[in-house]
Image: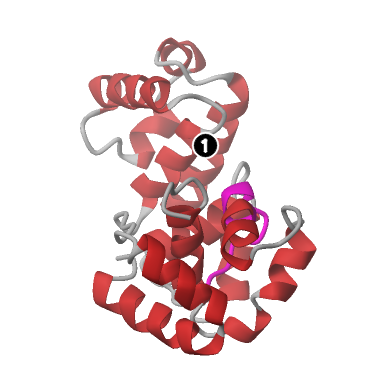
Amino acid sequence: MGLSAKQIETSLDALATLEPKMAAALAAAGYPEPRIRPRGYHTLLRTIVGQQVSVAAAASVWNKLQALLGEDIPPEKLLAADFDALRGCGLSRQKQGYARSLCEQVVAGVLDLHDLPDDDETAIAQLTAIKGIGRWSAEIYLLFAEGRADIWPAGDLAVQAGLHKILGLTERPGEKETRALAESWRPHRGAAAIFTWHCYNNPAL
């Protein structure tokens, strides 16, 4: 499960003692709500389904997949379904390829989502071996589903925009600068990421 409210508060309090601008933003915006997703195959499959479509469209595809394959959408059943049936649910050829890559690894036991490596970078490497799961998706999974405390998705535009606002930068930082700016925030960067999302369009700041 993701970082709890208490874990987020403890980490942000620690960061506020290191960074006065973080302390000021925290005083203005308050603590963010936790972002928690279930650990396992379904969360990654939902990530694939939701890529480059609206929340409503992704929910529609998910509901159709459940109607076709059963509420749990077992990976074996998805692998056995034919192209047209999955296309009828709204899965493009590309997304079918991604979904099958995930299901094949789960069914073969190559990927055990309940026993990923403890090292964050090694876990990210395992997740990005799935077609359609890039670094951002892997980082979001590890933060929201596993509650890994030091995940920092520096390529996320909202993280960059939030950092721009919190630190009062002249312009939104790129991925490399975003990564560098938070280096001293280890091991609390997961809570910092959640706080940047909380701040980037917050009218209090």
Drawn side of residue 187 relative to residue 57, left or right: right
Question: Magenta residues, as a range?
Answer: 151-160
- Residue 8 lies in what quarter of the image? bottom left
Residue 33 shows in this picture: yes
In the displayed structure image, the side of residue 115 where residue 129 appears, left or right = right
The picture places residue 200, in percent across and down from the top left corner, at 52, 51
Local SS, label 1: helix
**Above or below, comparing residue 15 to residue 62 in the picture:** below
Which image quadrant is residue 166 in? Answer: bottom right
Callout 1 crowding tier (Cα within 10 Å): few <14, some 14–19, many ≥20: many
105 up-or-down from 95: above or below? below
Q: Is residue 153 magenta?
A: yes
Q: Is residue 112 magenta?
A: no
Q: Identify which amino acid the numbered label 1 is placed on.
A: Arg
Instruction: Tell me the residue at 55%/57% (across/down).
Output: 138
Q: Nearer the viewer, residue 85 or 34?
A: 34
> Pointer 1: what residue?
100
Query: Residue 54: x percent and y percent?
Result: 46, 24
Residue 55 at what x, y percent from top left?
A: 40, 28
Q: Nearer the viewer, residue 128 or 174?
A: 174
